[in-house]
Image (spheres, rainbow, N blue to C red):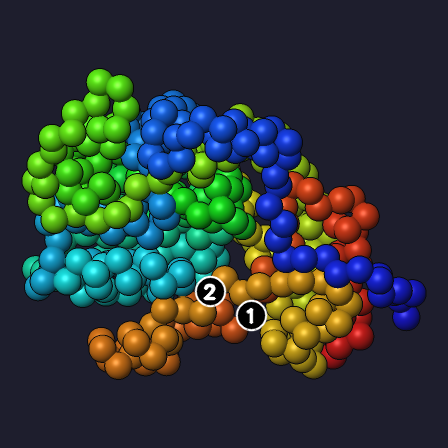
Amino acid sequence: MSQFTIRETFIPYNIPNITDLEINEVLETLKSGWLAKGPRTIAFEKAFAEYVGAKHAIAMNSCTAALHVALMTQDIGAGDEVITTPMTFASSASTIVHTGATPVFADIDYRTGCIDPDEIEKKITSKTKAIVPVHYSGQTCDLDRIYEIADKHGLFVSEDAAHALWSRYKGRLIGNQLRGTASYSFYATKNLCTGEGGMLATDDDKIAQRARILTTHGMSQNAWNRYAKGGKWLYDIVEPGFKYNMFDIQAALGLKQLERMEEMQQNRLRIAARFQEAFGKMDAIDIPWTPDYTAHCWHLYVIRIVPEVLTIDRDRFIEELNQRNVGTSVHFIPVHLMSAYQKRFGYQEGDFPNAEKHFDRIISLPLYPTLTDEETQYIINAVADIVEQYHK
């Protein structure tokens, strides 16, 4: 029997990594008097585009906004179909619904958790207009296969890169050499955090121009600076748009987080490597598998339990971790199991067996740059203790 002792304090699932650099930049922003979209937002867009290697970056208030705008730039709407994965957060699908189009789900590759290109091909019809592949947990999709399918059928590709800042496909950052768009999230739990926020990246001038207009109510360009000295008060609404823009307080955080990106990522890589080594020795734990084409950014560390060798299921495993003061999450409940999608589109349990099998077994463990060596080892020991106690 192991000699496991429960720690007194709880290890949260996630803690944002905010330092004095970010705090001081936010204070300077507040003192500047420019709180809405302004010079820091523009600077963040420029720095982000340079970082990922994209021609354009448009800062928004969420990744959800970026995903929505990406489809809107293609005039996707009623009567159209857009293919995505059920193994994602609801926004990947809801933004399709918000355009008036129909979300069509394609099952995942069980090894990676990402959308399966072979399943995409099966779902293409004369109504299909776009594909929204999701880079799940920091693992990249098989982009060559996806773009091959898109080219064959004349489809737009909007990459959901909410989890994939720093991730690489065949050596290049997601967002580099884009043929469509990539949308990023800066939510509180993400690798780069602005509290809320997102970014749309593209190399296409026309997409970028229209995205900037759609993001600020459909205003003619540069209307954001109409209150600055030399700014023009006269503007036009060229099409009905949205209030989706980022503002300078968020961008202040983003600028400093981007400066610290490599430092934060190296900590994530170090922790993930320890998890991979330790959990890879446990027959009750299925560790993340990364194909050769991926450099994983480890936004999430997702284990799968192997119920065949345990006397408890995933939900009980999570309860046991909680009792041992380890926070967890589950990414994700497949979207096709949500009542809104079952009622409106007729999806039901059993439609996507790989996604459902994956969901039944997954647990997201704490993984963030400020996780200490002691906390990392404690998480490993807690999982090992549960496996030992409930092993068949």
User: Where is 389 relative to 28, above or below?
Assistant: below
- Most foreground residue, 218 or 95: 218
Which residue appears at 16% of the width and 29% of the height? Answer: 233
Q: Is residue 89 left or right of residue 138?
A: left
Res 353 seen here: yes
Q: Quadrant of residue 327?
A: bottom right
At label 2, which amino acid type do we have?
Answer: Phe
Residue 371 percent coordinates (x, y): 71, 46
Which numbered disc, 2 or 1, marks the residue that appears first in the sequence? Answer: 2
Which quadrant is the C terminus positioned in? bottom right
Instruction: Identify residue for label 1.
Output: 361
Query: Which numbered tag is attached to residue 332?
Result: 2
Which residue appears at 54% of the width and 31% of the height? Answer: 27
Which quadrant is the N terminus positioned in? bottom right
User: Where is 123 relative to 117, above or below?
Assistant: below
Residue 122 percent coordinates (x, y): 22, 62
Which residue appears at 63% of the width and 49% of the height? Answer: 15
